[in-house]
Amino acid sequence: MNDYNRIAWIYDVLAHWVFRGNILKSQTRFLSQLQPNNRVLIIGGGSGRVLESIVQEDIPLTIHFIEPSEQMIEKARKRELKSSNLDVSFYQTRFESFDTSDKYDAVCCFYFLDLFKKKSLNLHLAHIKALMNNQAILLVSDFQNRKGTWWQKGLSMVMHVFFKFTTGLESNKLEDFDCAIVASGFHRDSDADFFSQFIFSAVYKKEVSKNGNHS
């Protein structure tokens, strides 16, 4: 389920062609919020294109990059990162199997949450929250049905059918990711829309309770 090995060779080209470069634009929109010496977790990092954009931020970062697809993570490892300030460790594993005692200053979920049905989505969000420092940021880029136009509904349906056939996609529809994230104890700090509002990028932070503690 959610196995991208079969389409790793064409995924980036296909995504760029269909969405006119807005996938990468959404991923890079808030990278400027990363701070020097942050510990960063990238979940479902795919072929690692975003790593090359992070290099351009020109700050030292420790990055843990999780990707279950063997073909995808092999492409990510080949990215030109050696001369950068990034200390990147690659983990070929599913997020639910990622066992660590580390806490992160930033977590990146770029086109990861859309893989799951609501129950799994909520479990993953709880796992993500547990790995974050109290002042950490959660960077999310994904699809949304905000406008609900006919072409967005049609494209969403085609995407789900295609990825269901090629990857065994778990999800059957786009969930309300913002609602799920907020319900998991976060608040949205910044956001931006792309591709006629079919794509969004947002920064979330842990919600602070009335007594000043993080929920």
Image: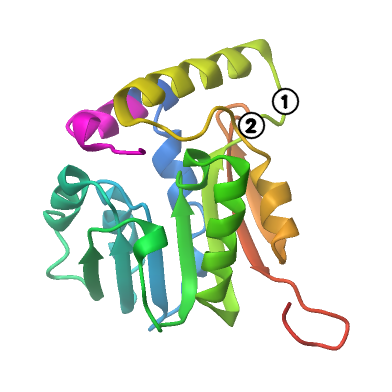
Closer to us: 118 or 40: 118
Residue 1, horizontal then vertical, whole percent:
35, 38
Question: Against 24, is 52 above or below?
Answer: below
Residue 129, horizontal then vertical, whole percent:
58, 70
Indicate which disc, 1 or 2, sits on the residue closer to the N terminus.
1
* Quadrant in the picture for the C terminus: bottom right
Question: Can I make out residue 31 in this image?
Answer: no
Residue 66, horizontal then vertical, whole percent:
31, 60
**Residue type (three-letter) at the residue carrying disc 1:** Lys
**Residue type (three-letter) at the residue carrying disc 2:** Gln
- Describe the colour scheme in one phrase: rainbow
Find numbered disc 2 in the image and state the secondary structure of the residue it sits on. Answer: loop
Q: Are marks 1 and 2 in contact (CB under 8 Å)?
A: yes
Seen at 23% across and 46% down, the residue is: 69
Question: Against 168, is 59 above or below?
Answer: below
Q: Which residue is mark 1?
A: 147
Dividing the picture into quarters, in which one does residue 56 lie?
bottom left
Question: Against 24, is 45 above or below?
Answer: below
Q: Which residue is mark 2?
A: 197
Seen at 40% across and 72% down, the residue is: 40
Around disc 1, counting alpha carbons within 10 Å, would you say few (fewer than 14), some (14 to 19), or many (20 or more)? few
37 inside magenta stretch: no
Residue 158, horizontal then vertical, whole percent:
47, 15
